Amino acid sequence: MTQYNFAYLDEATKRMLRRAILKAVAIPGYQVPFSSREMPMPYGWGTGGVQVTAACLVPEDTLKVIDQGADDTTNAVSIRKFFARVAGIATTEATARASVIQTRHRIPETPLAAGQILVFQVPIPEPLRFLEPRETETRTMHALEDYGLMQVRLYEDIARHGEIARAYAYPVRVEGRYVMDPSPIPKFDNPKLHMSPALQLFGAGRECRIYALPPFTRVESLDFDDYPFTPSKAAGQACAICGAADSYLDEVITDDAGGRMFVCSDTEYCSSRAASQQGDAA
Amino acid sequence: MTPLLRVEGLSKSYGTHPGCRDVNFTLWPGEVMGIVGESGSGKSTLLNCLAGHLAPDTGKVIFDTRERGPRDTVTMRESERRWLARTDWAFVHQNPRDGLRMAVSAGGNVGERLMAVGARHYGDIRAQAEDWLGRVEIDAGRMDERPRAFSGGMQQRLQIARNLVTGPRLIFMDEPTGGLDVSVQARLLDLLRGLVRRLGLSAVIVTHDLAVVRLLADRLMVMKDGHVVEEGLTDQVLDDPQHPYTQLLVSSVLQV
């Protein structure tokens, strides 16, 4: 592999990406445009995340890739293999051992530490997109902090459903300034964004935007005084495999007679808990 | 007393085609100014320049702001102008579809301006929206319906409620009764007159309907080809028109 550049991208592209990332880190929550490249995978499969990861990787890094919390789904496996091949770096499934984690739709349950980088794959970076279709107007709204419309959306939810029904991609305010789409993570994960010791980077390949949360950034979920934000998950359930009551759960249908179970969406968290329980029993 | 709005030498052209030319007038607090003229005479261009939707080529639009006194809205920062547009100003469009969010419930439409200026208590926002829907004679039971379920007259009243909820001091109206049938027009005019008088609002009303200005406006400006050709008290202009164009306009009204 020596005839190829380290981590797939050519140096000019990496420089462009790193400049965009530095700017994003300097202005937390601000969407920095970048010239997104074609990646050897379709849009919507994580082209933005892959470019950000490739720009961050150094040969000493250990990479973890998760998709909806799982380490063993197609997307996660192929992106992990891709980087193992083009960068020759070590990979892992253990959150605590990884230095760079690329993720789609989840933040790992194991708390992140200083020095780690979490890279999110983002389909639609603009939180105001479905409220205001004009890009020129949404940019002006961000520039002027004109966020009344975002609140109207939450108002409509309460008026129609009795509560803020948005369960994922729940809008947040960064350092009291920019309103940001945290990518389609469940709102259960929103509190983990707040004051995280890890660097969090967001890459949207199709939409050509990079934004970031530097370590220890204030991140508040939008809400009303009398309808406060609640990081909800499957109520009153615990994981059927490891028994965790504090993790985000997936509902799995087991037969066609109404049988179902709830299991941790973070597979590495679940299996490590199950393994340590077996160790205790033996 | 400081005038609420003072317009000096305002001109706006579209390429070589003139929109409005050298308009000067003063609007005092509590006064309603009517602007009449045929289609294409520059009425709407003038109104859009006043409300900050269009940038005039030359001239000043000096508005008496609450905090900092008279300021030129043409040269102020966009953020300040937008702040004025959602607090001290209101804009009622001819077509309610332009002024309402059709995909948002009536309550949300009224609440938007409140939330834009920082209201974050759902119960309070809803109570205020309900109060304003009542004032424009919309049943509180229809608060969670979307505007497309409303009749044209109701949509127009909803647009007025949405604009007045933050207690503006100046309303711009562009043909507020256009496209409504006469009985609905009469009710809307009645409502507008009541609101303007009770709240002590100032207004600039653009219309080609002389009956509307007769009922609502204290003073009247007649525009033709971008120029103001006549100006004066409403009754004076309508009963004793001096300019040939005004005479034509007044004599063209059908008598039933």
Image (cartoon, coloured by chain):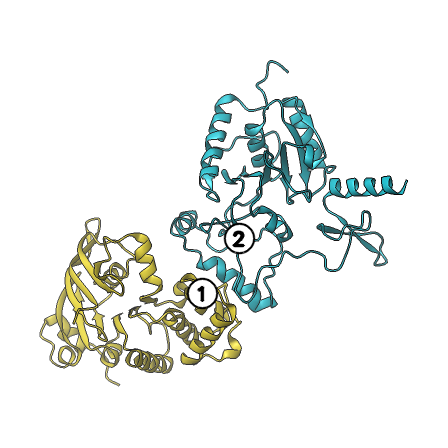
Chain colours: A cyan, B yellow
Query: Vertically, is A2 above or below B239?
Result: above
Residue B202: x and y in percent read 25, 73
Q: Chain of mark 2?
A: A
Q: Is residue B183 above or below residue B61?
A: below
Residue of label 1: B119
Q: Which residue is mark 2?
A: A220
Check disc 2 and report its element: helix, strand or loop: strand
Badge 1 crowding class, 10 Å Cα cut-off, few under 14, some 14 to 19, many 20 or more, is some
* Inter-mark Cα distance, 1 to 2: 17 Å
* Horizontal and vertical percent position of residue B256: 26, 86
Which chain hosts label 1?
B
Q: Residue furthest top?
A: A3
**Amino acid on which the number 2 mark rests in the picture:** Glu
Q: Are marks 1 and 2 on the same chain?
A: no
Q: Quadrant of residue B48?
A: bottom left
**Could you tell me which quadrant the N terminus of chain A lies in?**
top right
A66 and A248: which is toward the camera: A248
Give amino acid for label 1. Ala
Q: Residue at x 33, y 72 (%)?
A: B178
Image quarter where the C terminus of chain A lies is: top right
The residue shown at (56%, 31%) is: A51
Reply above or below: B7 against A40: below
